Amino acid sequence: MQHETPITESEKRSELLDSLSSWTKVVYALHAFSLLTGIIGTATVVGAFLTGWPSIIAVILNYIKRSEARGTWLESHFRWQIRTFWFGLLWITLCMAFIITTFGIGLLVTWLPVALVGFWFVYRIVRGWVNLVDGRPMYV
């Protein structure tokens, strides 16, 4: 009869962090896929990121696993990913509201903030993924 050694708290924590790290990589990959769809497809980067199924699934996954990440260095990545989506949605909603309130004339100037939000999405996903791979938390 084999005698199994019990799993220590340290080993459990290490397994949890490995699992959450993999989960976080999947979320970054889903967001990156949405961005890539916007870059090479007919959609815009912003449109693909905010309405594409990969990013919507990514945000749902963030909320599902967020409580497990509390108290770990990965918590900052979950917060970073969630805030990237919601703040982007906020900025685009404000741009759309401006276009509506100016009866479409605002379209002449809102292309610039919308483009900046697109670059901001790319920056946030790339920076987050690089920090994750390097084992560093995000500064939120």
Image (tube, helix red, strand yellow):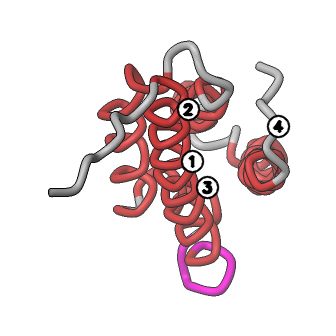
Q: Position of residue 98 (x, y in %)?
A: 62, 28
Q: Position of residue 60 (x, y in %)?
A: 32, 41
Please identify the quadrant where the N terminus is shown: bottom left
Q: Are marks 4 and 1 in contact (CB under 8 Å)?
A: no
- Gap between marks 4 and 1 measured at Cα: 11 Å
N-term-proximal mark, 1 vs 3: 1
N-term-proximal mark, 2 vs 3: 3
Name of the residue lying farthest toward the front: 1
Measured along the vertical axis of the image, is residue 76 above or below residue 81?
above
N-term-proximal mark, 4 vs 1: 1
Q: Which label sits on residue 136?
A: 4
Q: Quadrant of residue 5?
A: top left
Span of residues in magenta: 38-43
- Gap between marks 2 and 1 measured at Cα: 10 Å
Q: Position of residue 88 (x, y in %)?
A: 62, 36
Please, what is the three-letter code of the amino acid marked with disc 1? Answer: Ser
**Does 133 sit left or right of 47 as displayed?**
right
- Gap between marks 4 and 2 measured at Cα: 13 Å
Q: Which label sits on residue 21?
A: 1
Residue at the spot 57% in from the left edge and 85% down from the top edge: 41
Give the residue pinned by disc 3.
46
Give the residue pinned by disc 2.
78
